[in-house]
Image (tube, grey):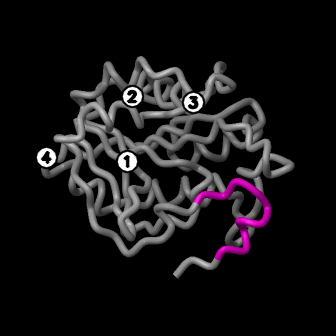
């Protein structure tokens, strides 16, 4: 078993404020937003689980050929917590999970690498800190498996982090992508340093 965490990329959201499925919007080199983030995760982690909603089913074959494990979240409308639980259930033997959001395509590959390394070196929970703001991706050690698998709300793993503040390691970062998500079309004009 690899000591690297499993990448867990959440791409099952509805993206209602964007006006269309934002995850399919091309960001860089005509790659859809979710696929750009998927490529970054795959550059660092040998195993990535992509949790999708039915709209992304047409992309499954090409993503699986690239090496991703794609899981359909039948309860995507219940929110991000159900997607996390779905992804963890699909990789129960992982040493940990690095959970990323597909609508945050500006996260640097280097940041993913640094967070993965912190998990490998013993962090229980790790998250980037950019200008005093906690961002994403967030990593969890295997000991949080049951709590992650029991999530079902739209607040994700925030409550787990709040309940285990003493186990949270914040990684100082200069990566503005860790706090920049794309919710509406106007967010695409944000310049990331």
Q: Distance between the residues labelled 3 and 4?
A: 28 Å
Q: Distance between the residues labelled 1 and 2?
A: 16 Å
Which mark sits nearer the N-terminus, 1 or 2? 2
Q: How far apart are marks 2 and 3 (CA)?
A: 21 Å
Q: Measuring 72% from the left and 68% from the top, which residue is drawn there?
A: 188
The relative height of residue 156 versus residue 62 in the rendered view (above or below) is: above
Q: What's drawn in magenta, residue-wise?
A: 181-190
Kindly report which numbered mark, 1 or 2, lies closer to the viewer in this rendering.
1
Q: Do the residues labelled 1 and 2 touch (CB within 8 Å)?
A: no
Which mark sits nearer the N-terminus, 3 or 4? 4
77 horizontally vs 48: left or right: right
What residue would you read off at disc 2? 91
What residue would you read off at disc 3? 154
Kindly report which numbered mark, 1 or 3, lies closer to the viewer in this rendering.
3
Density class for disc 2 (Cα within 10 Å; few <14, some 14-19, many ≥20) is: some
Name the one closer to the observer, 42 or 176: 176
- In the rendered structure, find residue 138 and report the number of the disc placed on it: 1
Residue 168 x, y percent position in the rendering: 23, 45
């Amino acid at each position: 078993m690899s000591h690297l965490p499993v990448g867990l990329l959440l791409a099952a959201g509805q993206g209602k404020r964007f006006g269309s499925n934002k995850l399919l919007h091309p960001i860089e080199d005509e790659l859809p937003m979710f696929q750009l983030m998927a490529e970054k995760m795959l550059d660092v982690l040998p195993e990535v689980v992509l949790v999708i909603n039915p709209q992304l089913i047409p992309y499954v074959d090409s993503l699986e050929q690239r090496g991703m494990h794609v899981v359909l979240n039948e309860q995507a409308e219940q929110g991000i917590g159900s997607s996390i639980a779905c992804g963890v259930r699909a990789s129960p033997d992982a040493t940990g999970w690095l959970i990323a959001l597909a609508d945050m395509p500006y996260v640097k590959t280097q940041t993913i690498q640094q967070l993965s390394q912190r998990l490998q070196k013993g962090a229980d929970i790790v998250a980037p800190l950019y200008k005093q703001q906690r961002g994403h991706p967030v990593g969890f050690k295997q000991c949080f498996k049951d709590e992650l698998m029991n999530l079902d709300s739209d607040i994700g793993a925030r409550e787990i982090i709040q309940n285990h503040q003493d186990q949270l390691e914040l990684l100082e970062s200069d990566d503005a992508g860790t706090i920049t998500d794309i919710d509406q079309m106007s967010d695409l004009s944000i310049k990331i340093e």
